[in-house]
Image (spheres, coloured by chain):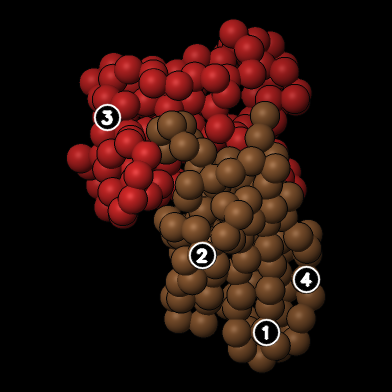
């Protein structure tokens, strides 16, 4: 598509429930990133995919969080046994390549985010 | 984890005024970026800086990559109401793929 698409835009759930957030990156972008943005703060890195594999998942806060990208395009962020502290905006971004270096191919384009509220 | 200190946290200025904000880090970055975020949207890239000392402009925006690689600033000249939003700096560490570390943001409010 023309941009990074995230669904749902808003999700309200109860503590202890399971949640899935979906990201559809820009067509042809091989790298995909998940970030979490708490109220009043900057985005924090969660996980990065290069193709189908998770190249870096060092930002995932604990084992309740998991993400997949089975066909190297759409990605799903999964949160088990949600807690109130999980409430945040979950941002997805994609880039043409995932290699550090110079040039526009490494620029991340962000989606509008999925706002998760855990009651 | 890595921390970027961004200041000021917020600014309330008169339309037409110039604005300056900056980021500092205890670590060296090899790329600095500046993003703008509006309510209900994701961050949008404004300027990317790839070399120490680099000074880059994008319309009324000018940003510089500090010589020490540990800081960057963003200037907005002749502010207009549509400049309202939250501005974030972001740094990329060498050998960290494309993972970005973001500052805490500067909330800009412009009074017409």
What is the spatial separation of the Cα atoms under label 3 and label 1, in whole angstroms? 42 Å
Q: Which residue is disc 3 drawn over?
A: A73
What is the spatial separation of the Cα atoms under label 2 and label 4, in whole angstroms? 26 Å
Give the mark, 4 or 1, whose residue is nearer the N terminus.
Answer: 4
Residue under the image location 73 percent in, 73 percent down: B109
Marks 4 and 1 in Cβ contact (< 8 Å): no
Give the mark, 1 or 2, whose residue is nearer the N terminus.
Answer: 1
Mark 1 lies on a secondary structure that is: loop
Q: Residue extending furthest left?
A: A28
Q: Which residue is disc 4 drawn over?
A: B11
Q: Mark 4 lies on which chain?
A: B
Marks 2 and 4 in Cβ contact (< 8 Å): no
> In the figure, the brown chain has which letter?
B
Question: Residue B56's x, y, as percent?
Answer: 45, 71
Q: Which residue is disc 2 drawn over?
A: B53
Q: Which chain carries label 3?
A: A
Question: Residue A44's x, y, as percent?
Answer: 61, 36
Mark closer to the observer (3, 1): 1
Q: Position of A62 compared to A78: left or right?
A: right
What is the spatial separation of the Cα atoms under label 4 and label 1, in whole angstroms? 11 Å
What is the drawing colour of chain A? red
Residue under the image location 47 percent in, 37 percent down: B94
Q: Can residue A71 be seen from the camera position used here?
A: yes
Marks 3 and 4 in Cβ contact (< 8 Å): no
Co-location on one chain, circles 4 and 1: yes
């Amino acid at each position: 598509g023309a941009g990074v698409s995230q669904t749902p835009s808003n999700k309200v759930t109860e503590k202890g429930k399971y949640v899935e957030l979906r990201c559809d990156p820009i067509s042809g972008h091989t790298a995909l990133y998940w970030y979490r943005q708490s109220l009043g703060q900057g985005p924090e890195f969660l996980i990065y995919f290069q193709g189908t594999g998770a190249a870096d998942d060092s930002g995932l806060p604990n084992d309740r969080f998991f993400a997949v990208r089975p066909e190297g395009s759409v990605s799903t962020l999964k949160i088990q046994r949600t807690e109130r502290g999980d409430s945040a905006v979950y941002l997805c971004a994609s880039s043409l390549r995932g290699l550090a270096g110079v040039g526009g191919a490494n620029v991340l384009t962000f989606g509008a985010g999925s706002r998760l509220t855990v009651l | 984890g890595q921390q970027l200190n961004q200041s000021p946290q917020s600014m309330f200025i008169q339309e037409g005024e110039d604005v300056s904000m900056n980021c500092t880090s205890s670590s060296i970055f090899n790329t600095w970026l500046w993003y703008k975020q509006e309510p209900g949207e994701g961050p949008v890239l404004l300027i990317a800086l790839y070399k120490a000392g680099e000074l880059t402009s994008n319309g009324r925006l000018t940003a510089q990559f500090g010589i020490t690689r540990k800081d960057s600033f963003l200037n907005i000249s002749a502010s207009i109401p549509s400049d309202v939003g939250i501005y974030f700096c972001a740094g990329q560490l060498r050998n960290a793929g494309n993972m970005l570390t973001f500052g805490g943001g500067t909330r800009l409010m412009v009074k017409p």
